[in-house]
Image (cartoon, rainbow, N blue to C red):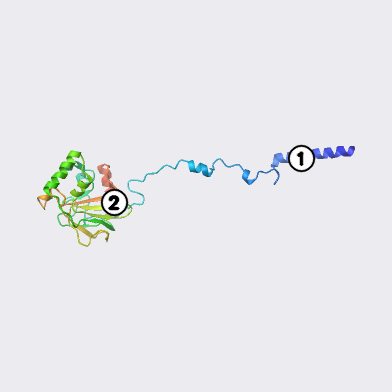
Amino acid sequence: MLGRISLLLSAFLVGVALAVLLAFCGPLPGVNAPSVDEQPTPASSASPSDLSTAPPPPRILPPFFPENAIRTGFRFPIAGACLSSTDNHMPNAPRAYRAGVHEGVDFYDGYACAPAGRGVAVAAARDGVVLRADHGYRELTPVEMEAVLTRSQRQGYTGVEDLDRLRGRQVWIDHGAGIVTRYAHLLDIPSAIREGVSVKAGQVIGYVGNSGILEGLTDPDAENHLHFEVRIGDRYLGQGAGPAEVRGLYEQVFGGR
């Protein structure tokens, strides 16, 4: 009888000791421990089904000049030239005669820091590939010109096709990253400048003229100048910006800052 009581007392004491040990040290290895599959999932992790239904991250719109675009290093398309100090020669200047706005930079004799009159050489502003060269250009007739201007006034803007005709003889050069330069109102284009031809910065791609211009229909010496554009996708550089910002953008393009 006494021996049985001793065994029960020993078992009780062992149980108490185990309870105290578990309270302070946690479960012993391999004793009632949850399996790997039973481990609780941290609150920050998400299952594949959660990820598939999560809203996409907000779209970050690129700046006007895309990050991978060419921002600087263009040459002036006329040797020794500078930007005109006249805002009327810059993008967004009004063009009331056709109910539109100017989309590029004009280089005129007396405003360009260098000769820019009829026949002056026009050069590629940067290395690139020729997209367009209007060797077969046909000048607008007076009747066609009147129709273009009348249509523009009636609708309150210059249509895309009409504006293209008013740019006269043109060369377009692709510089990559969605950037294209346009050279307009040209008198002539060298025969070697054709679509698909690679050109280097400073290479002659045309000559200053007045093609596509109303005054040029009656006077070959009137309104000769180079109209130069920088295009980014379907927009022109400085589109919608104020005069100071537009000037700053073109100064950046030509390495002025």
Which quarter of the figure has residue 3? top right
Circle 1 residues within 10 Å: few <14, some 14–19, many ≥20: few
Q: Residue 128 bears which disc, if any?
A: none
User: How much space separates mark 2 and mark 1, taking CA atoms?
Assistant: 82 Å
Q: Nearer the viewer, residue 126 or 232?
A: 232
The amino acid at mark 1 is Ala
Q: Evaluate whether residue 96 shows in this view.
A: no
SS of the residue under disc 2 = helix
**Looking at the image, residue 222 lies above or below residue 8:** below
Which quarter of the figure has residue 147? top left
Residue at 15% in and 41% down:
150
Image coordinates of residue 249 in percent, x first then y, are 28, 47
Q: Evaluate whether residue 52 shows in this view.
A: yes
The amino acid at mark 2 is Val
**Looking at the image, residue 186 lies above or below residue 4:** below
Q: Which residue is mark 2?
A: 253
Which quarter of the figure has residue 202? bottom left
Q: Which residue is mark 1?
A: 17
Q: Is residue 244 left or right of residue 10?
A: left
SS of the residue under disc 1 = helix
Image coordinates of residue 20 in percent, x first then y, are 74, 39
Quadrant including the N terminus? top right
Q: Nearer the viewer, residue 201 or 165?
A: 165
Residue at 25% in and 43% down:
243
Image coordinates of residue 217 in percent, x first then y, are 11, 50
- Single out the residue that lies furthest toward the bottom: 192
Q: Nearer the viewer, residue 106 or 164?
A: 164
